[in-house]
């Protein structure tokens, strides 16, 4: 009898269903973000971490696997080995998270897609646009689930903002402003930290550092909530702190479908800003404002009416689609781990639906997919071209 993961009868209007078993998750890359994501995946109750290629050094991979309580036989020496070995096992991984430095994203994603294993890859999807487009084609050709780690789009209040905009709650959008300000790169010595060195190495990080790392989060969030594709930009890259081979700051003017103007700023040298991701969308009838450091609150402004603060929590009037992603009542804070957990919950539903041959209705799952990952690479590519041209307007290649 073929294993079925989802219930025979599905209520797409209610909470996500319980699966018949936990899905098996593999990990490629053993850095800090892998620990965050594994914690979040386990929080859902839908995943167990069972295998990994946790370092490019085989001995270190085994040692890291022991720290993760993995079976030694499933602590693989490379992602290539892992893809083949896990695909051959009857209890092999159902999906894999790829949390390596950027330059390995393409090869690792390709290896698992070709092995028939679903993928969640960290952003940026790739360092080269041609590689991103190849992954889009490969995922479409194999039919595999391919999610990308834009976890900021998985906060409940971001999903509520997306719903409000889609329902016309701010009228016709006329401007979009987004920024991601941090301060962790202010100390000169921070550039020597292992997790920072590769982010400043063009051979590993790609042609950008700040833009590829946090600027892509900002760009994705603006399009995700507004529903508008970014069509062009004008960019300037800067090194505002100690000398570096790649930028630590970027300022941009942006344009979206329908000639909607906007701004985008990203920096790691803004004292007092730790998670300074802020989104403001204004329209003909009102606006929305959201701040990562106060992520449980969404400000809705309707012109000539009192401002409204919508807060995350059960029983507070959020839409049914958002209610699925809420874990605790108002007054009991949720944050970035829960946002990652929401991404992994949607990934689990997508993986289970694919394996069961279930076609899910539009809007049931809104996880960032490989197409949105490729859009992020297009954004990076355009920003680099604009900066190198002296800040000229350049178009962003559409899908």
Image (cartoon, rainbow, N blue to C red):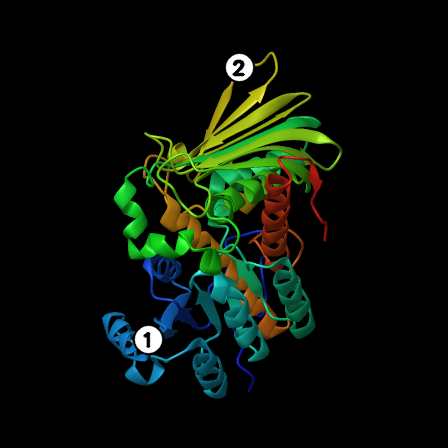
Give residue 306's mark: 2
- Residue 386 drawn above or below residue 357: above
Q: Residue at x 67, y 35 (%)?
A: 392
- Residue 260 screen position, x and y as percent: 70, 30
- Residue 183 screen position, x and y as percent: 34, 36
Q: Nearer the viewer, residue 242 or 48?
A: 242
Give residue 371's mark: none
Q: Residue furthest top?
A: 304
Q: Residue at x 53, y 80 (%)?
A: 3
Q: Secondary structure at mark 1?
A: loop
- Residue 71 screen position, x and y as percent: 30, 81
Foreground label between 2 and 1: 1
Q: Nearer the viewer, residue 128 or 93?
A: 128
Quadrant occupied by the N terminus: bottom right
Mark 2 neighbour density, 10 Å: few (under 14) some (14–19) many (20 or more): few
Where residue 7 sits, quadrant-wise, is bottom right
Q: Nearer the viewer, residue 340 or 132?
A: 132
Relative placement, left or right, of 159 versus 258 is left
Res 359 visible: no
- Residue 23 drawn above or below residue 256: below
**Which residue is identified by label 1?**
57
């Amino acid at each position: 009898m073929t294993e079925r993961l989802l219930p025979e009868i599905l209520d797409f209007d209610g909470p996500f269903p319980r699966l018949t078993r936990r899905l098996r998750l593999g990990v490629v890359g053993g850095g800090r973000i892998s620990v965050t994501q594994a914690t979040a995946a386990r929080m859902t109750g839908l995943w167990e971490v069972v295998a990994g290629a946790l370092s490019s050094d085989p001995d270190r991979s085994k040692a890291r696997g022991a720290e993760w309580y993995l079976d030694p036989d499933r602590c693989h020496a490379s992602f290539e080995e892992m893809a083949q070995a896990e695909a051959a096992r009857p209890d092999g991984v159902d999906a894999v998270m790829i949390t390596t430095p950027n330059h390995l994203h393409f090869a690792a994603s390709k290896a698992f897609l070709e092995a028939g294993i679903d993928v969640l890859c960290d952003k940026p999807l790739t360092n080269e646009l041609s590689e991103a487009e190849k992954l889009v084609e490969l995922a479409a050709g194999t039919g595999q689930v391919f999610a990308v780690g834009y976890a900021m789009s998985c906060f409940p209040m971001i999903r509520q903002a997306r719903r409000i905009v889609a329902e016309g709650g701010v009228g016709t959008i006329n401007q979009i402003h987004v920024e991601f300000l941090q301060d962790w790169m202010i100390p000169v010595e921070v550039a020597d930290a292992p997790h920072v060195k590769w982010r400043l190495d063009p051979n590993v990080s790609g042609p950008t550092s700040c833009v590829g790392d946090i600027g892509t989060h900002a760009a994705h969030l603006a399009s995700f909530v507004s529903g508008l594709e970014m069509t062009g930009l004008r960019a300037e890259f800067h090194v505002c702190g100690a000398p570096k081979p790649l930028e630590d700051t970027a300022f941009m003017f942006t344009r979206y479908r329908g000639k909607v103007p906007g701004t985008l700023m990203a920096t790691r040298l803004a004292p007092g800003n730790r998670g300074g991701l802020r989104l403001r969308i204004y329209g003909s009838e009102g606006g929305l404002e959201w701040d990562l450091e106060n992520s449980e609150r969404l400000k809705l402004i309707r012109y000539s009416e009192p401002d409204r603060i919508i807060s995350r929590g059960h029983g507070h009037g959020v839409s049914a689609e958002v209610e699925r992603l809420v874990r605790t009542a108002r007054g009991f804070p949720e944050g970035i781990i829960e946002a990652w957990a929401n991404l992994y919950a949607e990934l689990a539903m997508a993986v289970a639906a694919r394996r069961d041959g279930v076609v899910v209705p539009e809007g049931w799952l809104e996880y960032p997919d490989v197409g949105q990952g490729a859009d992020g690479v297009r954004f990076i590519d355009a920003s680099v071209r604009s900066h190198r041209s002296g800040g000229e307007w350049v178009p962003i290649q559409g899908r």
